[in-house]
Amino acid sequence: MIAAHKKVWSDEQMHYAYWLVYSAKRLVALMDDRAPLPEQFEVSIAERKQVQNYIRRVVRRWQNKKPRARLMRSFELDADMYSLVENGTTQYVKIMGLTAAKRIVVPLTGCSNFSGNVKVILDHKKQRIEVHTIGEIDEIVVLDDGNIVALDAGISEVFTGNDGTAYEPTFGKTIKKFSDRLNKTGKARNKLYALKKVSSKHKSHRIRKFNLGKQKLNGWKRKGKIQVEQNISQAIHLVVDEHHPATIVTERLDIRGKAKSNGMSRLVSYWMRGTLKERLEFLALVEGFHHKQVNPAYTSQMCPTCLFVHKNNRRGDIFQCLNCGHTDYADWIAANNLLARCHDNEITIFTPKSVLKNILQRRFSASLQNLGEHPKISVSGRTDAHSTVHQSETPLPNQTMGAVQECLCFMTF
């Protein structure tokens, strides 16, 4: 590389070039725009610049040609590539390596009997490996006429059951903590990205190297995802242990929609409803219950007593019917309406919202005609006395009769 310039470079330049490439530390400093200066001999500034620029061009040219290997986090092994051995109370797995007739011995924290294909996952943060195997699940007979539990998925808690129980009530604080931190980090990184675009070449390189790395950010996201998944699994196990359900009814968990605010959108995106659906389907096989999804449209806006539907029935976490005054928690109302739709043959999971709205309006009109024949009974099982107490605790909003008549006309047109 340097010999080609013997005829155009001076002796001082040749000496300086060999001095730079002789030490790897000096070469790295040169590529990082921190070219070292020799103390044993002198070279003019113009001659130094000529040598430095040439060496940088050659190194960058060859950097794109050298092979690169990515740091992998996992690899798969078949049954012939590993073996299990025991020495006293400790179990070891011997994994085939690159050296012939020499396997890598890894101690295991527990004792298990697995075979077949396995997946080895490297946890660089905890400096350990995990061996994942595929196990067979024994078929469990599910009783169709057993207990049915309806769960409304929320944000402040993982679930609210049709009996009013809130599962993992601290879940909202967990996702809000990670959502706020993710939002704050994203805003700071966006400013750095904008600064990088308008900065000089060397400053842009420093910003990209020291301020826009993703290793720490990805590790923090992975930690938050694991914690959210743990809360979801704990909530499902609590439901199964308390009720031993034959069927768990939830809303359709793969629905995506636009939230009311950006903050709510961040919380919903971190909710990971796909994880919730996957855990419910898996535990349904393990614990032996059915998982049924129903159409969730208007479940938190429909009164279970008089069937009146209006968006103003719900105000935050409180539900208060504008027609009959029935008051309760909105998530509880939604869970009971989900339970009622479990056996509703007219409303399916794929019924469009416009068609479903017409069905609910027709049912409310029919209930008005039969108002004298059927008493007001809450789906949640509350007596009239309990309903009265809740109404006195949360009184009806100060509305005129005309506003109520307007709501009734809205439902019966």
Image (tube, rainbow, N blue to C red):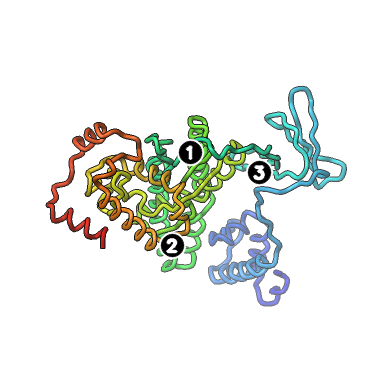
**Mark nearer the N terminus (1 vs 2):** 1
Q: State the image coordinates of residue 317 (x, y, percent, origin top left).
A: 30, 44
What kind of element bears circle 1?
A: strand
Q: Which residue is mark 2?
A: 193
Front label number (2 vs 3): 3
Residue, disc 3: 122
Residue 209 left/right relative to 83: left
Residue identifier under label 1: 148
Q: Is residue 277 visible?
A: yes
164 or 22: nearer the eye? 164
Residue at 70% of width from left, 64% of height from top?
66
Q: Nearer the viewer, mark 1 or mark 2?
A: 1
Q: Residues within 10 Å of mark 2 (few under 14, many from 20)?
A: some
Q: Residue at x 58, y 62 (%)?
A: 31
Q: Which mark is residue 294?
A: none
Real-space CA distance between mark 1 and mark 2, rounded to the nearest whole angstrom: 52 Å
Q: Where residue 350 sits: x, y (%)?
A: 47, 59
**Gap between marks 2 and 3 measured at Cα:** 32 Å
Callout 1–callout 2 Cβ contact below 8 Å: no
The foreground one among 287 and 208 is 287
Dot 2: element: helix
- Res 363 quadrant in image: bottom left
Q: Quadrant of the N terminus?
A: bottom right
Residue drawn 51% across the image and 57% down it: 209
Position of 203 with respect to 263 (left or right) is: right
Question: In x, y percent, where is residue 150?
Answer: 44, 41
